[in-house]
Amino acid sequence: MIKNVLLDWSGTLADDLSAVLKATNLIFAEYGRDPLTLEEFRLHFRLPFSGFYADLLPEATAEGLEALYERFFLGLNDTIELLPGAREFLGFCRDTGRRAFLFSSIKTSHFELQGGRLGVLDDFEVAYTEIMDKREKIREILHTHSLNPEETIFVGDMVHDIETAKHGGVLDVAVLSGFDRVEKLLPARPTIIARDIAAVQKLL
């Protein structure tokens, strides 16, 4: 039985793809680059996102990118809404006694603004944010909270999430509601592919 649920935020619980694309294109404009279309962005974007920028904006520094992203995204936090079924899924975890943890690369301040406005901050036992490479953190989380990998799933929308789950020995569940399209996810060999978080709830 699955007793523990690790959850990505962007594209899994929160509908922020358009906002992230807008902020990214504003950064590109600062460097005199043409904007990416949605399909171009979904094709090239990956985690850790330092690799994405290293490929497309090699002249940018990590500090400069962070400052620009903070400036451009700050005004977009109020546009983020939960994806369909996300609120119900978090309630399902609570009502069935499943332990829910956020496991995301989102900036802490952005999650607190979004999650606070959306009323979901208390739905997570612990919120792990600003995790640049989740593969380096998952085993620590499992150990810290005494989570049995055989009773744990990680639900995410990107190849990096699948790789992270497999690295931690937990069940990987890929959802199609976010950043990576199914064609991009398939080479990572996800164990389960679900349409969205509502479909994950039905599986559980």
Image: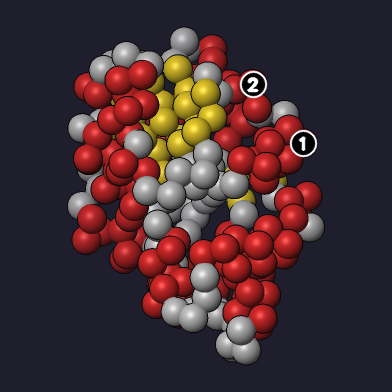
* Mark toward the start of the polypeptide (2 vs 1): 1
Binning the other alpha carbons within 10 Å of mark 2 as few (below 14), some (14 to 19) or many (20 upward) gives few
Residue at label 2? Answer: 122
The one of 132 and 116 positioned closer to us in this rendering: 132
Whether residue 99 is visible to the viewer of this picture, yes or no, is: yes
Q: Are marks 2 and 1 in contact (CB under 8 Å)?
A: no
Please identify the quarter of the rendering in which residue 112 is found: top right
Seen in the picture, residue 58 relative to 71 is either above or below; the reply is below
Seen in the picture, residue 89 relative to 51 is either above or below; the reply is above
Determine whether the residue tagged by mark 1 lies in a helix, strand or loop: helix
Check the picture and name the quadrant holding the N terminus: top left
Pinpoint residue 133: horizontal percent, then vertical percent: 37, 48
The one of 69 and 102 positioned closer to us in this rendering: 69
Answer with left or right where residue 158 lies relative to residue 110: left
Pinpoint residue 113: horizontal percent, then vertical percent: 73, 40
Answer with left or right where residue 191 lies relative to residue 197: left
Please identify the quarter of the rendering in which residue 173 is found: top left
Whether residue 2 is visible to the viewer of this picture, yes or no, is: no
The one of 49 and 194 positioned closer to us in this rendering: 49
Q: Amino acid at mark 2?
A: Asp
Check the picture and name the quadrant holding the C terminus: top left
Q: Residue at x 73, y 62 (%)?
A: 71
Q: Residue at x 25, y 59 (%)?
A: 186
Seen in the picture, residue 33 relative to 175 is either above or below; the reply is below
Kindly report the distance in space between the C-alpha atoms of the residues bearing marks 2 and 1.
12 Å
Q: Residue at x 66, y 66 (%)?
A: 68
Determine whether the residue tagged by mark 2 lies in a helix, strand or loop: helix
Answer with left or right where residue 192 lies relative to residue 87: left
Residue at label 1? Answer: 117
Q: Amino acid at mark 1?
A: Arg
